[in-house]
Amino acid sequence: LLIGTPDAASNTIDKVASFVGGKLYFQGLENGQHGIYQTDGTASGTVLIANRTGKSFFATPNTVVFAGNDALAGAELLATDGTAAGTGLLIDLADNTGQNLSGTIRVMTTFRDEVVLLADDGIDGEEVWLTDGTPSGTRRISDIAPGAAGIASNTVVSTDAFLFVTLNQPGPSNPWISDGTLAGTHELLMTAVDPSFAPGPAVAFGDKVVFT
């Protein structure tokens, strides 16, 4: 995707987000400067919102949330409403100033009207969080794997009805199912059927999840 006419080979666009209010949000690199941009699909309607880096852009009904670097908090969850003043830290998940982005937030996807992420708050390890794009609406679903290591998962699959989460750990393990609430989060006891079971790749298929 190129908007307007690039004047150098270094002008690149990446990490495209979902549409919000008819606008597209992305991180761009122009003349060596990274920034968060908004566009309506025209050159004149493409504007720089903030001089900062970001990745994994996802839309809530009114905001775009993304993993980015905050000058004071470090690698954290950020949000933008499409204005410079409305772009910044959504919530300080962990005291991790100077860490790489992957140290706090690794996997993001959508679930209903919210964004689901795997994040490490620096205390309870990596767990599943949900956000509606507001600080008060950003919360951990459950402490699935107690301890500093957390779940260390690479798989979060979303259907209309539930989330499917696997744990990346040696030996047999069970996947977890969640409807986004603490009460609706539970272990799927596959090892009761096969004691050696360890979940493999998974993909959403309608209102079900197919996995190995």
Image (cartoon, rainbow, N blue to C red):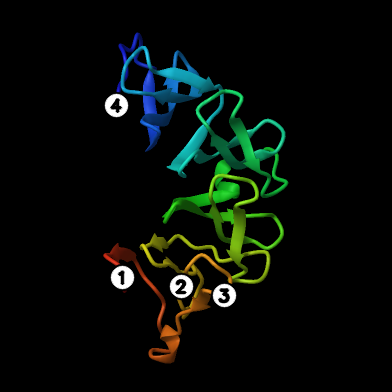
* Marks 4,3: beta carbons within 8 A: no
Q: Name the residue under label 1.
A: 208
Q: Is residue 142 left or right of residue 153?
A: right
Q: In this view, does 55 lie above or below 154?
A: above
Which circle's residue, 1 or 4, is located before the other in the chain? 4
Residue 81 position within the rendered picture, expressed as x and y whole percent measured from the top left: 52, 32
* SS at mark 4 in the image: loop
Residue at figure coordinates x 41%, y 84% from the top left:
190
Q: What residue type is labelled 4?
A: Leu
Q: Mark 3 points at which residue?
A: 183
* Marks 3,1: beta carbons within 8 A: no
* SS at mark 2 in the image: strand
* SS at mark 3 in the image: loop
Which circle's residue, 4 or 3, is located before the other in the chain? 4
* Marks 3,2: beta carbons within 8 A: no
Q: Which amino acid does label 1 sit on?
A: Lys
Q: What residue type is labelled 3?
A: Ala
Residue at figure coordinates x 48%, y 52% from the top left:
114
Task: Measure the alpha-carbon separation of dots 3 and 1.
Answer: 20 Å
Q: Mark 4 points at which residue?
A: 1
Task: Please tell me whether mark 3 or mark 1 is closer to you in this view.
Answer: 3
Residue 131 position within the rendered picture, expressed as x and y whole percent measured from the top left: 55, 51
Q: In this view, does 107 lie above or below 192?
A: above
Position of the C terminus, as image quadrant, is: bottom left
Q: Which amino acid does label 2 sit on?
A: Ile
Q: Name the residue under label 2.
A: 177
Task: Please tell me whether mark 1 or mark 4 is closer to you in this view.
Answer: 1
